[in-house]
Image (cartoon, grey):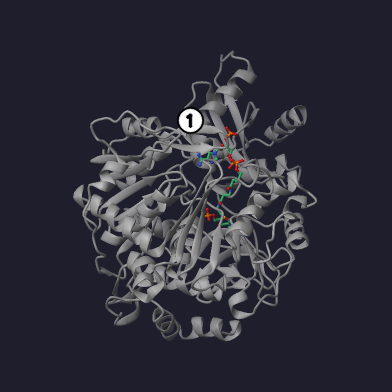
Amino acid sequence: MNYRDEYRRSIDAKEDFWEEKSKDLPWLKEPTKMLTVGADGSPSWFDGGFLNTCYACLDHHVDAGRGDQDALIYDSPVSNTIETYSFSELRDRVARVAGSLKKLGVTQGAVVIIYMPMIPEAVISMLACARIGAIHSVVFGGFAPEELCLRIDDAKPEVILSASCGIEFEKIIPYQPLIREALRLAKHQPKAVVIKSRKEIPAPDLGSTELDWDLWEADSVPVDCVALPASHPLYILYTSGTTGKPKGIVRDNGGHAVALKYSMKAVYDVQEGDVFWAASDVGWVVGHSYIVYGPLLAGCTTVLYEGKPVKTPDAGAFWRVISQHRVKVFFVAPTAIRAIRKEDSQGKLIEPYDISTLESQFVAGERLDPATYRWLVQHLKIPVIDHWWQTETGWPVCSSFPGMQELDTREGSCGKPCPGWDVMALDEEGTIVDPGEEGSLVFGSPLPPGALLTVWGDEKRFHDSYWKRFPGFYLTGDSGFLDSDGFVYVMGRTDDVINVAGHRLSTGRMEEVLAADSAVAECAVVGKKDPEKGEIPVGFVILNLGFNTKEEEVVKSLVKLMRESVGAFANFKLVFFVEKLPKTRSGKILRRLLRSMIEKESYSIPSTIEDPGVIKHIETVLSQSAP
Ligand code: COA
Ligand code: AMP
């Protein structure tokens, strides 16, 4: 494979290109038409084709004689557990759980929410849904009840699959009260909540619609894979948009499987038997694509790590996992490496481990800062590859390509476009800008296989969010530029989305949470650069008149509220009390201006500002509160 030829063909001869890639999958019925573009321009890939993603991930490898090969290694320093599942073992458990779901009445097209920590049952649940054509929606275990409730009411699951607890360092987080609270708040009620008991909370007290996972799984008739049309939804994954309501990104079975299988070879350069480790969470897209589906589709062994980069037990944890499980390719968010670097700046904790199996290190989820890049290069001495993607894209949009011997990188760039992605930077008028000039990063239409199909239950939002700003082009929400050699540089979001420790969060949602507090008259939340987390949210709050509680007390209560409403991982800790917010004459808060002021960057005062005097006031507040 040669990158230049692959890329050109993927743009100039899309259908032939993806037809060739689709042949790598065990279709139950081959597609008859590679690409159909609808009247509204949206693509449907592999029409006429039938497949089952669970079959392609598990049964296919068993049928091909690889049943005894390791499929999943569960490595959990927080529970002192290491378990390995072969493809046959994983297939058998998935078939049983699929049978149990069926017994509960879950049929093809029904939605199942999975709210779980990083335990094998999370992966098993996803694959079991795929096996019977149910649509899973995994909710990150760090989300608080209100966020879970938003997703329950939007996705309307028939069943929720969960566990008795998660483990955060030494802290045990019982999940059952969180689910009960979410269901108390929710309008929609599922038929059942199935709870996997963990040894840390072995026997939760079960209510009338709550079932014990082990009994439920044991009382099952294993079921086979159903044949699904390529366009049948595989999953919904919620992500933050500009409003408080999360967007349910919908992904299909066919395009997703073809794109992920292709990426495993072309981007990551792994094949059957190789060990692949993405140190993310199944609640995020990286977890879906590269803990679960991608590696299993490619017949790799995947690592499911329930731990942190540090303190479980130390900053050598990642290197221990790589050495113990002979990981070939490792994928992680830069924030995790920054956490390690902070505790082990000299890389001393790498030395005890033989990490010679590691051939490449991929990073994504946020901008790779130069210091982290250099630290990785210096200590790992292998290619360190920044690659850019989004929940919506499902697989990388830009990267370097060990699988195509294209390893050229530029500091600050996330590489060149992956085959299939037509990446451009546009100015305000929608004209392509010159190399080196920053603009809105967009993709030409049609998007390649694997990209989102729609927003669950809200086609209008799908069009308004992604296709309205520049008709014919998908709006990424990131700004950046391409250089004259075609390298892409992502500079940051253009909307009200921030990236906190690799977690994508909506400032709009955080503003809704703050505004609900009785102390708050008005507020704005913006992102502030942070050396460890990348960005952290900062609240600007106008207190209600006559509200006399001490400011420290208000901060405490707002921080608590945010932890209980969104989750602790939002890292909301910083609040500035102001008397006025900068607004345009039409009443829109000038968040970009607030961001520049916090960063002490130079800024020009917008001509649309309602009251220029507010600038001096905010400057004074910031200078008085400076740490
Ligand atoms: N369940 C409950 N609480 C959680 C949680 C979870 N799944 N994940 C995080 N939290 C809590 C933490 O315990 C912490 O709580 P505290 O304030 O009481 O101490 C708080 O949220 C902050 O979390 P975070 O900022 O994530 O820090 P951390 O030390 O827990 O983890 C990293 C650091 C780097 C491991 C983590 O941020 C991470 O994995 N980020 C990458 C995310 C990712 O993979 N993104 C996808 C793109 S690759
Ligand atoms: P998510 O949908 O949670 O995966 O977040 C996607 C967003 O994370 C992108 O729109 C970017 O803003 C950011 N992002 C992801 N990968 C990178 C990267 N390699 N470089 C810069 N930003 C990134």
> Does any portion of residue 56 appear in the rendered image?
yes
- Quadrant in which residue 484 is drawn: bottom right
- In the drawing, does residue 355 fall left or right of residue 371? left
> Does any portion of residue 41 appear in the rendered image?
no
Position of residue 515 relative to residue 491, above or below, is above
Q: Which residue lies furthest to the right in this view?
A: 346
Task: Estimate the x, y position of residue 239 in percent, counting from the top left.
Answer: 46, 50
Could you tell me which secondary element the residue under label 1 belongs to?
helix
Q: Quadrant of the C terminus?
A: top right
- In the drawing, does residue 474 fall left or right of residue 617? left
Task: Estimate the x, y position of residue 184 in percent, counting from the top left.
Answer: 32, 30
Position of residue 297 relative to residue 497, above or below, is below
- In the drawing, does residue 482 fall left or right of residue 255? right
Q: In which quarter of the image is the N terminus?
A: bottom right
User: How many marks can you see?
Assistant: 1
Q: Name the residue under label 1.
A: 564
Tell me the amino acid under the disc marked 1: Glu
Residue placed most toward the observer, 67 or 422:
67
Task: Estimate the x, y position of residue 79 in percent, counting from the top left.
Answer: 51, 41
Residue at (27%, 42%) from the top-left corner? 215
Residue placed most toward the observer, 55 or 160:
55
Which quadrant does ligand 2 occupy? Answer: bottom right
Is the CB of the residue bearing disc 1 within 8 angstroms of ligand 1?
no
Residue at (59%, 81%) from the top-left corner? 3
Position of residue 179 relative to residue 350, above or below, is above
* Crowdedness near tag 1: few (<14), some (14–19) or many (≥20) residues, C-alpha within 10 Å: some
- Quadrant in which residue 36 is drawn: bottom left
